[in-house]
Image (cartoon, coloured by chain):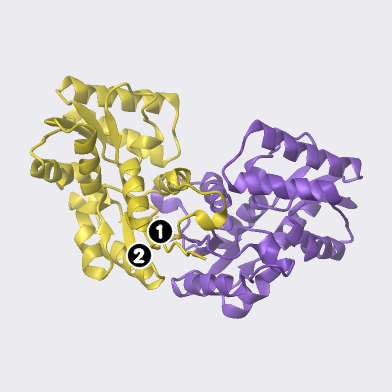
Chain colours: A purple, B yellow
Amino acid sequence: MLVERKRIVGIIGGLGPEATLDFFGKILLATTAAKDQDHLHLIIDNNPSAPDRTEAVAGIGPSPADSLACTALRLEQAGAEVLVMVCNTAHAFSSAITDAVQIPFLNIVDVTCEAAIKARPSLRRAGVLATEGALSAGLYEDALEAHGVEHVALGGASRVRFMELIGRIKGGDKSDEVRAGMRSLALELVDLGAELIIAGCTEVPLVLDDEDFKWPLVNSTDALVSRTIQYATYG
Amino acid sequence: MLVERKRIVGIIGGLGPEATLDFFGKILLATTAAKDQDHLHLIIDNNPSAPDRTEAVAGIGPSPADSLACTALRLEQAGAEVLVMVCNTAHAFSSAITDAVQIPFLNIVDVTCEAAIKARPSLRRAGVLATEGALSAGLYEDALEAHGVEHVALGGASRVRFMELIGRIKGGDKSDEVRAGMRSLALELVDLGAELIIAGCTEVPLVLDDEDFKWPLVNSTDALVSRTIQYATYG
């Protein structure tokens, strides 16, 4: 009997829980499986107690670094062979994770930028929907710059509006109003010259997808799902 | 600041993965949360490698007992303060779990029977949709008997049909045909005198819900979701 050994994936989740659920569901959907045993072994730590990431980046709240490091270590000790974190903003603290464990960590920002370049090799200007924390930490700005791509972000009032929408999604509101609001912010980035939109926050795909939005869109959840499956199956 | 401490829930999952996702989603939906930090801390071990439970009960396949015990222990070591397992059939091996850990284990069969009695205090005959393995192990039969309730199960050809449908659901098929097939099996139990139907397999709610089926229906996933939230919040 040929045993197809796959890597056990540890998922740092709960940031927020709904985005973690979305990631889990998309992993199952993207896995070719006729029976239970064909699926990946995933260990999900849905730990929503980590302090607010945007507040921490702004220096007005406690750091989630210790919480993230503990979660990462717990997953490694439980047998995870690779880690992913379903939250872009928390990647401002990714060094706390990579310092805490020996196993590899697939960085959602790197993976998403690679997916954007792959989707549009001629990409010059990418519009990024990301939280205030992710923007302040320069997560996508730095990663895109490494690929020679200009980072286009929302301006003042629209950033505030984006954070309001994220707060509503985290409170369970995925209404048409929230969807329309998110679509309209994505279109602002198009008006600012973006050739492609990066959903650089895992809450965004909960209310914005390719069906809603007729412009090249790369979402960070899907990009991480693809890379995770590829890595777990030794791709 | 009042810190509302909640118990960390360990979830033995992957049996199958889609049912685990369904459980996770229903926990989030049933939790009153305005922000991430209001949600429960869940550690989900989605370990689909455990051997087939029905084959093990029939003595024609290896036992999943060791795999379940290891998963339980891993979750306890990771910090879980209570365990649940999202699969009815695997409860035929629940002693392997309770022997392996010190923390409490909320038994889905017990919890579902309690929910059925609560939904219909005068219950005398309950129809149970369960796998061949769960039926052979007498899981619901014994638990209902303790409440003085008669257990009504499908006959030969319909049992085979039920297992075919479960196999299709586990392969990702939630088509109208599968839904109609499941509804028709549930109606057979009504014809056999069941006053209430218990969806005693966590794959069943993926294709059968109250909207499809106009007869008292208690599903084991929902029953376990309610009890888990209640226990985790010290109810």
* Res A10 seen here: yes
Q: Can you give x and y, in whole percent of width and height, for residue A157 in the image?
A: 83, 47
Spatial CA distance of label 1 from label 2 is 8 Å
Q: Quadrant of the N terminus of chain A?
A: bottom left
Q: Are marks 1 and 2 in contact (CB under 8 Å)?
A: yes
Please identify the quarter of the rendering in which residue B169 is found.
Answer: top left
Q: Is residue A201 left or right of residue B98?
A: right
Please identify the quarter of the rendering in which residue A57 is found.
Answer: bottom right
Q: Please determine whether, in this image, residue B36 is positioned above or below residue A216.
A: below
Q: Residue at x 22, y 28 (%)?
A: B196
Q: Please determine whether, in this image, residue B215 is positioned above or below residue A199.
A: above
Q: Can you give x and y, in whole percent of width and height, for residue A92 in the image?
A: 71, 68
Which amino acid, mark 2?
Thr
Q: Please determine whether, in this image, residue B219 is positioned above or below residue B74.
A: above
Which amino acid, mark 1?
Asn
Q: Residue at x 52, y 70 (%)?
A: A71
Q: Residue at x 34, y 46 (%)?
A: B226
User: Chain under label 1?
Assistant: B
Q: Can you give x and y, in whole percent of width and height, for residue A139 in the image?
A: 77, 63
Outermost residue, front side: B1
Residue at numbered disc 2: B71
Q: Is residue B20 left or right of residue B136?
A: right
Check disc 1 and report its element: helix, strand or loop.
loop
Q: Can you give x and y, in whole percent of width and height, for residue A108 in the image?
A: 68, 60
Q: Is residue B72 left or right of residue B130?
A: right
Check disc 2 and report its element: helix, strand or loop.
helix
10 Å crowding of disc 2: few (<14), some (14-19), many (20+): many
Residue at numbered disc 1: B47
